[in-house]
Amino acid sequence: MSNTVTKAVEAIYNLQSNDEINQVIDAIKLKRTALARSVTRSLMVGDIVSFGGRGQSVVTGKVTKVNRKTVVVKDNASNTSWKVTASAVTPLAIGG
C-alpha cells in the first residue's frame, strides 16, 4: 500500500464515533463520483475500453453510450452489451 493509503487507514481506525465514520464514507462516495465523471468526460462513443468482467476475465469492447456515471460497452467477442461504472473502465484506444 502507498504511504497515503496507509495514513488514511490508520486515521480511519482512530475514528471515535459513527458520525465520524459516516463523514469519511460520504467523502469517499464524493471522490468516487468525481473520478467516474472525470472518466466519462474523457470518453466518447466509439472508444475502445476494457474492464474486469465476471470472474477473472477482462472484457474489451467499444463504447456505445456514455451516461453521467456509467458507460455502455459492447463486447467485441460475444456482442454482449455491458453497463459499467465509469471508474472501472480503462481506455485503450480512441475511436474504433
Image (spheres, rainbow, N blue to C red):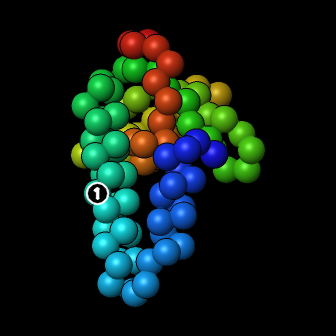
Position above or below: 67 against 17: above
Question: Which residue is rendered at x = 50% and y = 19% of the image?
Answer: 92
Q: Nearer the viewer, residue 36 or 82?
A: 36
Q: How many marks?
A: 1
Position above or below: 92 against 31: above
Question: Which residue is rendered at x = 44% and y = 77% of the image?
Answer: 15
Position above or below: 93 against 19: above
- Residue 35 lies, in percent from the top left, at 34, 42
Choose top left, top right, bottom left or bottom right for residue 65.
top left
- Residue 51 lies, in percent from the top left, at 56, 37
Residue 65 visible in the current orientation = no
Question: Which residue is rendered at x = 31% and y = 73% of the image?
Answer: 23
Quadrant (top left/top right/bottom left/bottom right) for the N terminus = top right
Residue 56 visible in the current orientation = yes
| Residue that carries the numbered disc 1 in the rendered image | 30
The local secondary structure at tag 1 comes to helix
Q: Nearer the viewer, residue 2 or 63?
A: 2
Question: Which residue is rendered at x = 66% and y = 35% of the image?
Answer: 58
Q: Is residue 2 left or right of residue 35?
A: right
Q: Residues within 10 Å of mark 1 (few under 14, many from 20)?
A: few
Choose top left, top right, bottom left or bottom right for residue 19.
bottom left
Find the residue positioned furthest to the right.
56
Q: Is residue 18 left or right of residue 8?
A: left
Amino acid residing under circle 1: Leu
- Residue 11 lies, in percent from the top left, at 47, 66
